[in-house]
Amino acid sequence: MASWTGAILARELKKVNASTRLIQITEQTGRTEEVARYEIDFSNTFASVSGVVTGSWQQTELGRMGVKVLSTTGNREISREECDEDGSFTCDVFVPGQVKIGTVFDYYATQWIGGDSYETAQVFDIQPGDRITDISVVESGIAVQLEMPGDLIGVRPVFKIGDENDLEVWINPTGNNPYYFFNFRPERYFVYVEGYCDNQIWAPQWFGDAEDFESAEPIDLVAGELREISINLVEGGRIEGEIRDSDGRVPSGARYKVYDLEGDPLCNYWKHWMGDRMLFSGLPDGTYLVAARDLGNEPWYYPGTIEFSEATQIVIGNHQTVAGLVWTLPVAAKEGSP
């Protein structure tokens, strides 16, 4: 009885141009093999989006702008490409349908084509063979130099940048003092540097030596510019202390949190320090309440109460230090700990 075994293998050898590929076809029959090569034009099987993105990013060597294409079905990213040095780009799109297009730098702060948000961005209906070639964006950037007390060893600055309606948090900006932010529209922005939550010793501050938004100095960006600004940070207030259990010892694993008079925490997470001593630094002037907890316990407030309304208010003025706070973990709470 005769038998036949064989296979046909296809492999892309190289990209000839934007739409043509050199393909090698290998046909194997028994012990024989035949090889043929073809240039195949795929231009009618996919769409493409091309254009140019220029601006502030080209004034540094910190990276390149990119362009991404998202399908409106499930908000899925279906294509992303980095711009060339001159800002030109081409994104091949193999998924037909409605899409939205945005520019990005290092995965932060997308600038959407035809709108100021994803929701308001222009919708493009792309079908195989379509060529969108007229995307043109001129972005702007901000370089922030921080002048501060102390250094940045082990401490990261956290920025908020935006207009009066929306501030976007930037945790990992590009660069290392100065810090760079790209991909902005030529509009008005405000810059805020956070304090205290991540062990910063400086008080939070707005650009323009302002402690509140109303006094902040706006930045009116021009298309394509890289605006350089400097923020002079000052050392903030400090609250130092510790809790003790009923035996007078500092409980291991104690966590602390600072609240304002409205009951809102300055940071959303409980903080812990080596040696179990409390130290909140970089506090702006104001009135605060301090709470502590040990393992799974409910928080209790200085000087030793579980009632928020009975807690002692701690006033920070002129960025002063309030030290020596000591209070005892209630016995009932300690007995209930896991």
Image: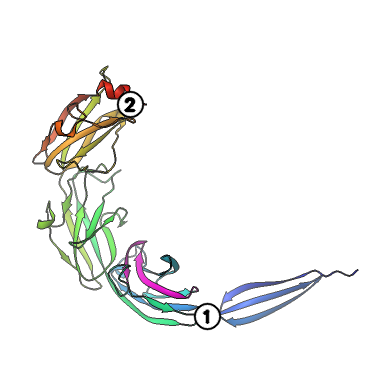
The answer to whether residue 205 shows anywhere in this view is yes
Magenta-drawn segment: 94-112
> What secondary structure prevails in the magenta region?
strand
Q: Name the residue under label 1.
A: 19
Amino acid on which the number 1 mark rests in the picture:
Ser
Q: Can you give x and y, in whole percent of width and height, for residue 225 in the image?
A: 23, 70
Residue in view at x 28 percent, y 61 percent? 181
Residue 144 at x, y percent in the picture: 22, 58
Q: Is residue 314 left or right of residue 277?
A: left
Question: Of helix, strand and loop, which one carries label 1?
Answer: loop
- Residue 107's place in the image compared with 6, above or below, is above
> Viewer-proximal residue, 40 or 311?
311
Tell me the residue at 15%/34% (across/down): 309
| Residue matched to label 2 | 252
**Quadrant in the picture for residue 106:** bottom left
x, y percent for residue 203:
17, 46
Q: Among all residues in the image, which is located at the extreme top?
A: 247
| Amino acid type for the residue under numbered disc 2 | Ser
